[in-house]
């Protein structure tokens, strides 16, 4: 895993910024978010798509690294988005693909991306959830993102009710693990002032196996980074478990059996505590 791919795979927070608001790009980069996502899709109205693409291209041209969310295939803006991204090798670290359902389309898109640019499929439809294992296994996919708002609208459920989308979230976690890509990124929390809602959403996502969060405001970053990082107690437990298992055989720590799956969990905790940095 190269440093860029590793950075995407271990990132906790992804701050999305409308592509037509260039005055926010620098602020987003200084927000403490692990990765900035420049959005050419939902956050930009049709009248400002070209202007947004130009602003994003200018930012990338100044050697600023970002993820770019493009318009989906079949829209009138998709081809121009992809062409612009191809002009910025090294600064487009990944492309976020909305309405991801067809692994063949992701494979075709990958051929037009700069070398080293990863793919983050935004799984936000029933079709995407059903085909999540194939979507996650497509060439270039680093980790999936769960689009809770769009899926909830399609299903006619409340995106704020955890049980309504529990199955879909778990399906994406399983698909990511089965395909060998990084654990998924959870969708947005729409409340900007209710920290308790953000914390509840984060805790629910972590319980199900998510290790990242798409944020829509800088004030969400610090809470998300803290909630998505292992606690000191978890890190201490992981270190003790690995030390206890140095002999390579099944052992006991703190009254519990330690076998290879337990050691793997301990190593995963330590990797989240020391994420890969961009180089």
Image (cartoon, helix red, strand yellow):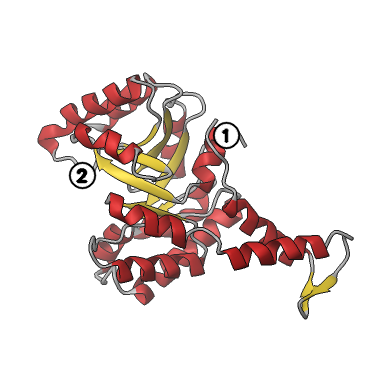
Q: Which quadrant: the C terminus? A: top right
Query: Is residue 190 in sight in this rendering?
Result: yes
Identify the residue under disc 2.
43
Residue 214 spot, x, y in % from top left: 36, 52
Q: Residue furthest left?
A: 47
Number of the label disc, if any, that sits on residue 174: none
SS class of the residue under badge 1?
A: helix
Image coordinates of residue 76 in percent, x first then y, are 21, 32
Taking the spot 13% from the left edge, 33% from the top edge, the residue there is 48
27 is higher (above) or lower (below) than 188: above
Q: Quadrant of the N terminus?
A: top right
Q: Nearer the viewer, residue 202 or 117?
A: 202
Q: Nearer the viewer, residue 156 or 270?
A: 270
Instruction: Estimate how packed mark 2 is, as few (under 14), some (14 to 19) or many (20 or more) residues with alpha carbons within 10 Å.
Output: some
Picture quadrant of residue 261: bottom right
Counting from the top left corner in percent of width and height, residue 141 is at: 50, 41
Instruction: Tell me which label, 2 or 1, sits earlier in the chain.
Output: 1
Q: Residue at x 47, y 31 (%)?
A: 117
Is 178 left, or right, of 198 in this rendering?
Answer: right
The structure residue drawn at horizontal position 61% and vertical position 49%, both measured from the top left corner, is 180
**Which residue is denoted by mark 1 in the rendering?**
3
Residue 124 horizontal side relative to residue 267, left or right: left
């Amino acid at each position: 895993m190269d440093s860029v791919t590793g950075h995407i795979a271990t990132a906790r927070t992804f701050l999305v910024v409308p592509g037509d608001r260039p005055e926010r790009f620098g602020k987003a980069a200084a927000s403490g978010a692990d990765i900035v996502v420049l959005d050419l899709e939902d956050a930009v109205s049709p009248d400002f798509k070209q202007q947004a693409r130009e602003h994003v291209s200018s930012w990338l041209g100044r050697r600023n690294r970002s993820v770019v969310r493009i318009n989906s295939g079949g829209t009138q803006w998709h081809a121009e988005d992809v062409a612009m991204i191809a002009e910025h090798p090294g600064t487009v670290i990944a492309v976020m693909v909305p309405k991801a359902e067809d692994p063949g389309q992701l494979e075709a898109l990958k051929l037009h991306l700069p070398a080293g640019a990863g793919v983050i499929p935004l799984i936000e439809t029933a079709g995407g959830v059903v085909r999540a294992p194939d979507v996650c296994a497509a060439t270039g996919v680093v980790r999936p993102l769960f689009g809770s708002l769009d899926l909830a609208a399609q299903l006619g459920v409340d995106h704020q009710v955890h049980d309504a989308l529990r199955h879909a979230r778990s399906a994406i976690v399983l698909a990511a693990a089965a395909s060998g890509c990084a654990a998924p990124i959870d969708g947005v929390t729409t409340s900007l002032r209710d920290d308790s809602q953000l914390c509840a959403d984060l805790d629910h996502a972590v319980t199900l196996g998510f290790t990242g969060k798409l944020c829509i405001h800088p004030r969400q970053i610090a809470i998300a980074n803290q909630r998505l990082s292992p606690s000191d107690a978890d890190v201490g437990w992981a270190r003790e478990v690995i030390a206890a298992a140095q002999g390579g055989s099944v052992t006991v720590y703190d009254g519990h059996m330690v076998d290879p799956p337990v050691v793997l969990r301990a190593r995963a905790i330590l990797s989240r505590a020391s994420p890969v940095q961009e180089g």
